[in-house]
Image (spheres, rainbow, N blue to C red):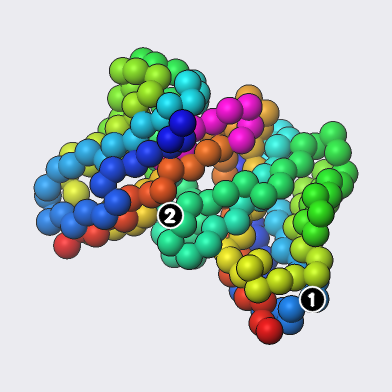
Amino acid sequence: NAGVTQTPKFQVLKTGQSMTLQCAQDMNHEYMSWYRQDPGMGLRLIHYSVGAGITDQGEVPNGYNVSRSTTEDFPLRLLSAAPSQTSVYFCASLLGETQYFGPGTRLLVL
Amino acid sequence: GENVEQHPSTLSVQEGDSAVIKCTYSDSASNYFPWYKQELGKRPQLIIDIRSNVGEKKDQRIAVTLNKTAKHFSLHITETQPEDSAVYFCAASVTGGGNKLTFGTGTQLKVEL
């Protein structure tokens, strides 16, 4: 049981490039979320999903897309990276009310 | 939407002393309040949570109190140890919307020897 996994751990992008942050969980949790963490701002919800085929926007969705084709995977896509998207990204899955966070992806956009 | 404010942003205590971190929330519908600990470079981890039908909850050296009328809740750490040094986040959500947590901005706790 690996829990919540994220890849890559670290990524450098140039402005305008696209990429996908991967997130997977093997706990069969229906609920999954993406957060970004910036200094002094805590964690902010980007997108979330309540099950395969269902996604919705969180607090800061602009510039990000998600899909949920399977229960296990919840990728986050940056279509055209901007320096403002430099952050640490955490994926999480939910059982009951408890969030289980992945190890995070540190993204630097130049 | 929900807004969670957290104070202080930094807190330094001597080993063995107590530490208190306070949060306020704005949405009276919020009824689930978890606290997370995040060590440097690591993921946030749940340390304790409380639901609105309970006023206080304790787990060894950690306790959380909730005042629904005033819309504030607090984390209390007693007999602090160096390994308690970390960033602590409070959060709030509505039951059933648990994956829509609203987080506070965090408190950097430093326990000095």
How packed is label 1: few (under 14 Cα within 10 Å), some, or many (20 or more)?
some
> Who's the residue at 83% across and 49% down the image?
B58
Residue ranking furthest to the front:
A1
Residue ranking furthest to the bottom:
B113
The magenta stretch spans residue A20 = no
> Who's the residue at 36% across and 54% down the image?
A88
Occupied quadrant, residue B10:
bottom right
Residue B39 visible in the snapshot: yes
Q: Which mark is residue A18?
A: none
Residue under label 2, please give it.
A37
Residue A57 visible in the snapshot: no
Task: Give the percent coordinates (x, y) of residue B69.
Answer: 85, 45
A48 relative to B12, above or below? above
Q: Is residue A58 left or right of residue B101?
A: left
Task: Give the percent coordinates (x, y) of residue B91.
Answer: 63, 47
B17 relative to A27, above or below? below
Q: To which chain does the residue with label 2 belong?
A: A
Magenta segment's dominant SS is strand
Magenta residues, as a range?
A91-98
Q: Which mark is residue B16?
A: 1
Q: To which chain does the residue with label 1 belong?
A: B
Q: Which amino acid, by three-letter code, is at mark 2?
A: Gln
B40 relative to A21, above or below? below
**Which quadrant of the rendered structure holds the C terminus of chain A?**
bottom left
> Who's the residue at 70% across and 37% down the image?
B32
Q: Which amino acid, by three-letter code, is at mark 1?
A: Gly
The residues bearing labels 1 and 2 have C-alpha atoms spaced at a distance of 31 Å
